Amino acid sequence: MFLYAWLILLLPLLGFIGLSWYGDKIPKKFAGYLGCATVGLSFLVSVAALIDLLALEADKRLGHVATLYQWVSSGTFQLNLSILIDPLSVFMFLIVTGVGFVIHVYSIGYMDEDPEFSRFFSYLNLFIFSMLLLVAAADFFFLIVGWAFVGLASYLLIGFWREKTSAVLAARKAFVMNVIGDVGMVIAAFVIFDAFGSINFVDVFAAAPDKFRANDDTVLLITLLLLVGAFAKSAQIPLHTWLPDAMEGPTPVSALIHAATMVTAGVYLVARCHVLYELAPYTMYFIAATGVITAVFAGSIGMVQYDIKRVIAYSTMSQLGYMFLAMGIGVFSLGMFHLMTHAFFKALLFLAAGSVIHGLNGEQDIRKMGGLKSVMPLTHITFLIGALCLAGFPLTSGFFSKEAIILSSWHAEMGNFVFLGIAVITAGMTAFYIFRVYFYTFIGKQRNTDAHPHESPFIMAAPLLILSFFALVMGFAAPAVDAFLSPVFGREMVHYHDSFLETIAVLAGLGGIVTAGLIYLTSQDKLEFAKQAFAPIYDLVYNKYYVDEIYDFLIVKPVRAIGGFFEEKAEREGIDRAVDEVGAGVRQVSYGISLWQSGKVRSYALNMIVGVVTVLLFVVFF
Amino acid sequence: MSSLINFDDMNWIALAPELIILVTALFILLVGLNKTLNNNRYLSQASLLGIGAALVCSLYLWNMAPTAASGTQPGMFSNALINDRFSQIFNVIFLVMSLFAVFGSVRYPQADNENKAEYFSLVLLTVMGMMFLAKSGNLITAFISLEIFSVSLYILCGFSAKHGTGREIASDKVELSWETLSSQESTVKYLLTGAFASAILVYGMALMYAGTGTTEIRLIGQLLRENPYTSNLLVYIGMGLMFCGLAFKVSLVPFHSWTPDVYQGAPTPITGFMSVATKAAAFAVIARIFFIALPEIQEIWMPFLFGASVLTMLVGNIGAVFQDNVKRMLAYSGIAHAGYLLIGIVANSQEGMASIIFYLAIYLFMNIGAFAVVFIMEGEGQEGNSINRFKGLAKRSPLLAAAMSLFMVSLAGFPPTAGFFGKLYVFVAAIKAGYTLITILAVIASVISVYFYLRVIVMMYFHEEDEEIPFTIHKGMGAIVTVSTVAILAFGLFPSSLMQLALDSIPF
């Protein structure tokens, strides 16, 4: 009955194909509108799917597989071209297409002067299609296909400004990190097929609880391998280094990929495979631990960065850490809820930051900004809203989702004091760094007097307003979201009430804001003093804990050295030579066959006689 | 066995496609006497009409044919012919193939050649022979049908000859062109080696009769199953010799030597036609003989079929590496594909049979598509089919280059083209039957094949052209390339429906 849901995927795909082929031939305006229209229509179809799903009884909403046809059937391996429609996938459809559409519209304004306007929109459509394929897949095969396509699309978009070396390098880094994840996923799929004889979600998840007891080796292996993919896409330690670099892409890309959609793929994966993860409590602990560590790690780095987009990028990492924390302690629907609110306010923050960058003609260093409050009032207000949401200011959407996760990190069955402590500290850090950016950028005097900032055009402002609205109110949708998603996870979300913890969480957020205000609004001297006093720590954090350098030292350099050695010995002397020899051998044999082909009929007849005699010998003597 | 003529099982309706083709062939031969009607246009239209009608009949008859489930007897004409879905689906393959051959014959026979009617009528007679071959239920019918199409093909291979058009007195002393020489060489080589192979084949059939007392294919199978005394050395030797004779037709190593020479010299549309149709016809009868008549003595024939398959794949693919002539390269590639197809026989299972049908249906499109492009790019003289002519094609004709790339990639067996699924189903059938080793060897062989298939793509996309090579894409050729491209993509996306069709069409 959900066959029409294929339109959700097909529309952006058609947009991608059309724009790639004819993008140069149609007027620029039209290319932008076309790109938006496909995603917009896709959103409307998603809404239709939502309505149809809501019309069903809550327990009948699961496992609707819309199959186009059977693609491959070979032995026990069956592969259908099908998508899975259930509350979780529709939820993701709505976020991807909804936020995606708004960002598409914004891009019309932001990329207005780019000579390769239509190429940008064709990539954006490709990205949306890939992400939708990822969340719509009804089996691990198409999940991986979508997964890989998302990697490709992000590579194309991060490196969109291909004349910029740093952008190309960042794109490459992102691609490599993502491929590491892909490898994990592919191996996981093999293990799953081996264990279950199927790669369909419905079959696998139905069979899993009866087949394996908790913490069975196979389940642990599968869940950990899947995690490699999830962590790579969602930029969790240790596969996170690509995300900050990915800010080299145009800002709408950062908003779309590195805030609202792509990075949430990992969270989605854990949610989708929650049946497997529930069978692997060890993995769950591991997820939660990685989540909190990433949260505080990225949060602390965010406090000292000066690039406006990098700060937001680290905050994305940090917030993803919260989502993984929620997944790890088993409050899946809370994680998904935070994913949704985060999608709104993070897209908002990125787009507002983009508006600032656009207004300042490409300036990204917050030390050179300031006083934009009066010049860019709309951007200011919307950024402030985004910042408040991110900081968890009471009654904003971020407040509801983050608060709930913090409470669960103590009250949930798997919660503990460490999780709670780090989650609260991170909440404080979050508020601090985002308001640090806010004060730097919008308050005070304009530091760079050469710049002539201007407010962005309406086509960029409108998306900001839409996102602000949702960022502000979506927190109140918590019960609805919970009711919608709970059938998927088979459990009601428990609402913990603990006014003490709530107060602490709120205070942490407010404390962060106030601290940022005290430091950055009063005098720069204190700041310098603080930097001096904590110089070692400051340097450590400012340099992102030297993770890139550690990787360079621990992995890249040794690999290079080993690689150099192997290139010399194994590659040139061994493999290359072997390949060359085999190639030469094949050519030699081929040459021999040519010689054998004498062109003389009598020798052909001789060949046949040899053949006949051989066959007869076989027949008679065997 | 009664020698009386049995009038009850003369199912003329089941022979409708064959009869239509025969009538068309004779009609064209007569029409050719009229000078005004004796031109490519009229003759090809008449052929197309006949082929189209036969095609419709075959599709209809496929639906009506007796199946194992329906319980009706497939034998007719005293079991000399068999009417089942297997034969009808092969009819479809032959007819589609001949459709392409007629479409492709835009330059052949040449304008100065007067034997146009003979050309088209021979194409049709070839097809008719193949259709009877796929239907034969008796070794004698099989042999006669085989000779009908072989003799027609011997003549067709020599059709590049521009001279010697039947005039009694040579007007002038003529310089024979390279094409003429190589085409004549092709005919003679094919004829000589073919006669040799036919002799071996018919001797094998005679020994088979001596061993079992019958030439009926289904009866042989029944006797071998029920009567242990039938399983004797005469049968084994007869089987071995029959295999050798048929191996020549599908060009299995070491019976393959004629293939590159004949393929190279023959007119390109005929090469394309015979590369698929001959293979399909011979595999139809191989499948019938080994799957219906001889499954009981599997352990006797398995070793040399296995060996021939492996040898064929390796020699075919390795031999192609060295070729700079595209037609010769495709000839070697055709040899290799015969090796893959033989795996389906080795599997000796229903799935194996179905995978052969599937593979042939796919191979038809990718091979004829490749030959069509070769034909379009063809030049004159010894270098007329050199791979260097493909240099820089991507710039001059992106669509043609893209289509050729698709054919090459599909022949190499890359997913998600149809060629991948062709190989996949054959390999799966072999693995299920327990022949993992042959699958591994086949995969190694196809890895080698990637080299020369991709070489064409490299030439088209990564080389600058040496000189401007003029070419025209004739309508008929364009149609072949387009249809083949669509078919390869469609069967790549929807392989299971075709496989289901193949599974419904296995012989019984």
Image: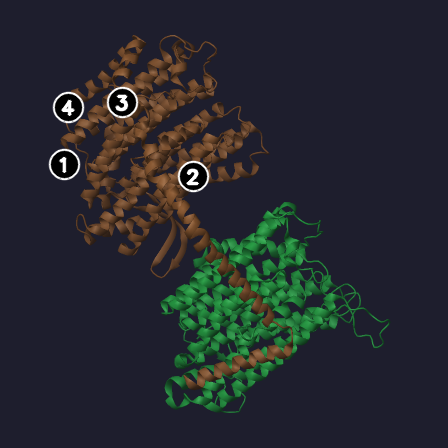
Q: Which mark is residue A536?
A: 3
The mark lying in front, picked from 4 and 2, is 4
| Marks 1/2 same chain | yes
Amino acid identity at mark 2: Phe
> Is A121 on the left-hand or right-hand side of A266?
right
Q: Secondary structure at mark 4?
A: helix
Disc 3, disc 1: CB below 8 Å? no
Picture layout, residue B284 above or below residue B228: above
Amino acid identity at mark 4: Leu
Q: Which mark is residue A501?
A: 4
Chain hosting mark 4: A
Distance from label 1 to label 2 (Cα)? 38 Å
Depth check, front residue: A124 or B7: A124
Label 3 packing within 10 angstroms: few (<14), some (14-19), many (20+): few
Read off the residue under disc 2. A129
The earlier-in-sequence mark between 4 and 1 is: 1
The mark lying in front, picked from 3 and 4, is 3
Read off the residue under disc 1. A413
Amino acid identity at mark 1: Glu
Q: Secondary structure at mark 3?
A: helix
